[in-house]
Amino acid sequence: MSTNKARPRGIILNYNFMYAIVDIAGQQFKVEKDNKIFVHRLAHEEGAEVEFDNVMLIDQDGNVNVGAPTIEGAKVKAKVLTHVKGDKVIIFKKKRRKGYKKKNGHRQQFSQIQIQDILVG
């Protein structure tokens, strides 16, 4: 027979955090404090402080605030860490039996940013 060990029952929710959905360079990201994310290249130098004010949703300890379309006065502060290139993407086009082949490719430019703070207006 098995021993009686204490097992957690049910779902334990831990709401000791805050996150936001923010629009950065045309894409939406879920960000939390101290996250490091890659975004399309920003026109700022490395080490520069950046503010994003297109905040669409904020979850603060389980209280969700949804904007229509954005939340007034809410901002996300970030710091630009580095500018990097992504992996090479190969584009190959071919039409069979026609002798048409075209190979092309590129490397996307990215900026790595670190989220420093989420400010609620």
Image (cartoon, rainbow, N blue to C red):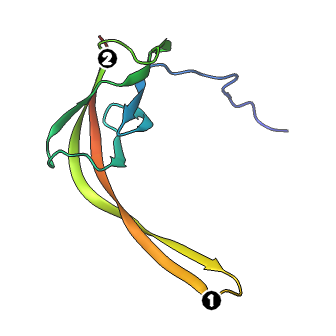
Residue 10 appears at what percent x and percent y? 69, 22
Q: What kind of element bears circle 2?
A: loop
Q: What kind of element bears circle 1?
A: loop
Residue 90 vertical placement versus 18 (above, below): below
The amino acid beneath tag 1 is Gly
Which residue, given by chain and number where applicable, does mark 2 sit on? 74
Instruction: Look at 43% across and 72% down and name the residue there.
Output: 105
Residue 94 appears at what percent x and percent y? 62, 79
What whole-number distance in Å separates the C-alpha atoms at marks 2 and 1? Answer: 56 Å
Looking at the rendered image, the quarter that the N terminus falls into is top right
Please tell me in which quadrant of the rendered image residue 31 appears.
top left
Instruction: Look at 21% across and 48% down and name the residue there.
Output: 81
Q: Dot 2, crowdedness within 10 Å: few (<14), some or many (≥20)?
A: many
Looking at the rendered image, the quarter that the C terminus falls into is top left
In front: 73, or 36? 73
In front: 94, or 66? 94
Which residue, given by chain and number where applicable, does mark 1 sit on? 99
Q: Dot 1, crowdedness within 10 Å: few (<14), some or many (≥20)?
A: few
In front: 84, or 61? 84
Please tell me which of labels 2 and 1 falls first in the chain: 2
Please tell me in which quadrant of the rendered image residue 115 appears.
top left
